[in-house]
Amino acid sequence: MDEYAISLALIALSALFSGLTLGYFTLNVHTLRRQAKLGNQQAAQIIPVREKGNQLLTTLLLGNVATNAILSIYLSSIASGIVAAFTATTLIFLFGEIIPQAVLSRHAMKVGSLCAPLMKVFMFITFPIAFPVAYILDKLLGEEMPGVYSNHEIMEIVSEHEDSEHSPIDADEERIVHGALKFSHMLVREVMTPAENIKSFDEHRRLNDNFFEEVNKHGHSRYPVYSGNQENITGILFAKDLIVEDEDISIKDTEDAYEHSFLKARGDEKLDVILARMLKQKQHMAIVLNRNNTCIGVITLEDIIEEIIQYEIEDEDDTQDE
């Protein structure tokens, strides 16, 4: 009976070392730190053990090899050579390797956190052997590299999470994350409203009934103002400030509604660059100019936000398609 108990104890120990070797090293130390920072207590328990990567690996492998060797020797002392060899191989293969690794690969975080205190004991016991080996490996290999993902990989990960029934990420969040990761690679010319589609006013246009009808018809909050031809933009007209202006005066003679200074952009600029300038200068619109400083389009803060959220923003003044 003692022989069976000892054999079972050795197999259990072998299973523990083997399973934890796979389990702990499926957990990235940088991911664990991030999860711990977000309040994951299991990750916090694992970090003190897992961050000593090479010492942990040396301890686990040393324990696994030693346990399997002792098990083989012990079985050979209570059975014939061929039987002992076959029995030891079968037991170690099934119960010392395959089953524990299959289990730990799926429950690494939970089992790893439960076994963290025990692993600290094993690491203390094996310190005289494991630490010198780990020290050499640390010097030769350096620190573990963090897992860094490209924009497209992050987008694919988010999509996979959205498709999973176990993830809280929904379709709206997936769309917005994709838009946020793509918009910084887009150019202003891809998003701007071309000059031929812009509603603008001559600076000499007078504030009469026809003018206000046009403003109300288009429903924009800002209009480019030009001099001579529509490519020569001279300022921005703010519709909300027209209410305080005198009647039947020209746009250029208004006191508050017409602003001579305006934000400029180039067609080959990235969206994140122009967004940063808009936020810094507190501007909602930029006039897109070519190399000859003539207007080729307009880009607004709303245009950029639409690219980020991947959804067209419509208000009560927008025309609805029937």
Image: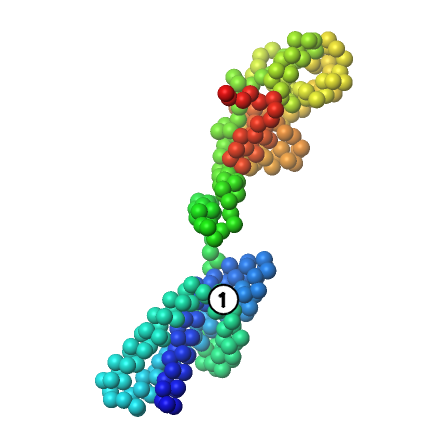
Q: Where does residue 145 sit, x and y in percent of width and height?
A: 47, 59
Residue 162 in picture, x, y percent from top left: 47, 46
Q: Quadrant of the N terminus?
A: bottom left
Residue 16 figure quarter: bottom left
Q: Residue at x 31, y 74 (%)?
A: 93
- Seen at 65% across and 8% down, the residue is 210
Q: Position of residue 141 (x, y in %)?
A: 43, 66
Neighbour class for label 1 at 10 Å: few (<14), some, many (≥20)?
Answer: some
Asked if residue 136 lies left or right of residue 219, the reply is left
Quadrant of residue 257 within the rendered picture: top right
Q: Amino acid at mark 1?
A: Lys
Question: Which residue is situated farthest in the left direction here?
Answer: 82
Asked if residue 170 lies left or right of residue 16, the reply is right
Nearer the observer, 290 or 95: 95
Judging by the rendered image, the residue that carries numbered circle 1 is 110
x and y percentages locating residue 86 in the rendered image: 25, 80
When the figure is inspected, residue 161 is found, relative to residue 303, above or below; the finding is below
Query: Left or right: where does residue 272 sit relative to residue 147?
Result: right
Residue 154 visible somewhere in the drawing: no
